[in-house]
Amino acid sequence: MTIASDNEAFARHLVKTLHSARLRLYANDDLVGVEVGGAVKNVMAIATGVADGLGFGMNARAALITRGLAEITRLAMALGASQQTMMGLSGMGDLILTCTGALSRNRQVGLKLAEGKSVEAILAELGHVAEGVPTAREVLTMAERLEVDMPITAAVCGLLYQGNDPHQAVEGLLNRSPKSEGGGVLL
């Protein structure tokens, strides 16, 4: 687990106090990175649930999680976070768990969206908070304000708030202009 604090002495104290043979803790002073990673992973879990629900397989899941991490990292860095945080437990670690875990409420939302259920019906059936639903809209608004490209987040918002078809959302993502993995447009 990660303990985030801008007070180094406090973080060190908590790590030493709570650390045990069954709980390994790491201190991190990148509050923005930890917060962004912890919030936006829920949006990516919805997307991953859709892909899983549509039967796209493990390679598609891995690609989606990887590109989701790229989106999260772009936003986090635009907000002043460290790229290193996004490669750690608060970024990649939490993202992988939330996108693949059977108990992930946000992944469950995506699975049910792939079945064609409405957001309202899904949330009523779930009976628990799925943080990615309200977070998706806020993240997209922030990304647009900061001019950060977040196509997966935009696709999730289309599913949640515009009633877009899951197959068309995937098609829209796949039909984007080809780019290098570093983000530059291929010629």
Image (cartoon, helix red, strand yellow):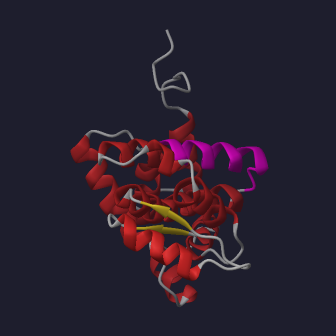
* Horizontal side of residue 81 vs 88, given as left or right: left
Q: Estimate the x, y position of residue 4 in percent, counting from the top left.
A: 42, 66
The structure residue drawn at horizontal position 45% and vertical position 80%, both measured from the top left corner, is 120
Q: Residue at x 58, y 59 (%)?
A: 89
| Residues drawn in magenta | 55-70
Magenta region, main secondary structure? helix
Q: In this view, does 109 lie above or below 43?
A: below
Residue most extreme to the top: 187
Question: Would you identify the image quadrant in which residue 7 lies?
Answer: bottom left
Q: Does the magenta-highlighted stretch encompass residue 9?
A: no
Residue 110 in the image: state x and y as whole percent. 58, 66
Q: Position of residue 56 (x, y in %)?
A: 73, 50
Q: Nearer the viewer, residue 108 or 164?
A: 108
Q: Report the residue at 47% width, 83% height from top.
A: 129
Horizontal and vertical percent position of residue 11: 43, 70
Which residue corresponds to the image point at 56% horizontal and 47% vertical from the top-left?
87
Quarter of the rendering containing residue 144: top left
Residue 126, compared with residue 99, is above or below; it is: below
